[in-house]
Each structure stands twice: as structure tokens, then as C-alpha cells.
Image (cartoon, rainbow, N blue to C red):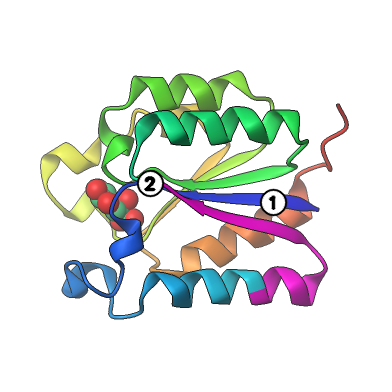
Amino acid sequence: MKLLVINGPNLNFLGIREKAVYGTENYEYLVDRLMSKAKAEGHELEVYQSNCEGEIIDRIQEAYRTKVGGIIINPGAYTHYSYAIRDALASVDIPKIEVHISNVHRREEFRHISVTAPACTGQIVGLGLTGYELAMDWLTKNAQAADR
Ligand code: DQA
């Protein structure tokens, strides 16, 4: 199955930013862990990161054109206010899981709202980097290979 992970702003700073919240492992560690899992299970995976809203939207649209079968997205702070990313997610008929490393519901009030989650199939929060792997497991077991 063809899968795409999209990480939004500041996620490339894992291991540098707010370690008590996001852990000490760096972004390369996350990418390696996901790529190894995909390889071991025979899935095609791209892990993409951008700090720019428009680039994330372009990548979601590209996923439609390239017949990606499942998207895992951590929109970072865009989660809480980007109607443009929400609309892009809603535009593509691809199963999508929103992942947050931290438990956003236990944090500042502005993080309690996700404007992007309603455009996704499901959401995983607060389980650290494992959340990405759980999202992969769900998509590979439940999402039909894209047939467009
Ligand atoms: C985050 C939570 C967001 O509120 C924050 O802006 C991030 C990371 C998470 O993975 O826990 O950048 O999406």
C-alpha cells in the first residue's frame, strides 16, 4: 500500500524543541522508524515535512494525483486554525489519520480545537511517536488501496 506521512511546522525540530513535551528523539529517528516499519511490512511510504501551509496543501493534492492509499498527518500548530489545510484534506477521498505526539487536550486551551480533524477519518493523540505507527497499522488494515 502507498502511504504518505505529512508533518507540519516545527516537527523537524523534534529532539530540539520542548523535549519534556515531544521527547528527546529527533526527526531523523522518527523518519527511520517509520520507513523501517513500512519496508518490513511491504508498504511504500513517503515521509514529508514542511513549515509552510501552501506546501502542505500542494502535497495533499499531489497525494490524490499519485493515488496514495492513506495519509497520516500531523499539521502541528496549523491543526488549530488552518481552514485551508482542512479544506485540502476534505477535498481528497483518501483515508486520513490525524496524529499528535502530545495530548493536546491536556495542554493550553487553543490546542483543544482541531479544525483539521473533522476532515480526517480518525485522530490519535498523546501516544508519542507510536501514534504514527498505530495510524499506519490502522490504514494498512482498514483502508482500501486507492483505485481511482
Ligand atoms: C502537535 C501539537 C500542536 O499543538 C503543536 O503546535 C505541534 C505539535 C503534537 O504533535 O503534539 O507542533 O501537533
Asked if residue 119 is positioned above or below residue 111 in the image, the reply reads above
Q: Is residue 94 visible?
A: no
Residue 76 counted in the magenta span: no
Which amino acid lies under the numbered mark 2 shown in the image of this protein? Gly
Q: Which residue is mark 2?
A: 8
On whether ligand 1 comes within 8 Å of the CB at mark 2, the answer is: yes
Q: Residues within 10 Å of mark 2 (few under 14, many from 20)?
A: many
Residue visible at 81% across and 53% down in the picture: 1
Q: Which residue is mark 1?
A: 3
Q: Position of residue 9 (x, y in %)?
A: 31, 47
Determine the residue located farthest toward the right in the rendered image: 147
Q: Position of residue 16 (x, y in %)?
A: 22, 72
Q: Position of residue 92 (x, y in %)?
A: 64, 24
Point out the tag, 2 or 1, that comes first from the N-terminus. Answer: 1
Q: Position of residue 43 (x, y in %)?
A: 78, 62
Residue visible at 35% across and 79% down in the picture: 25
* Marks 2 & 1, CB-CB < 8 Å contact: no
Range covered by the magenta-colored residues: 36-50
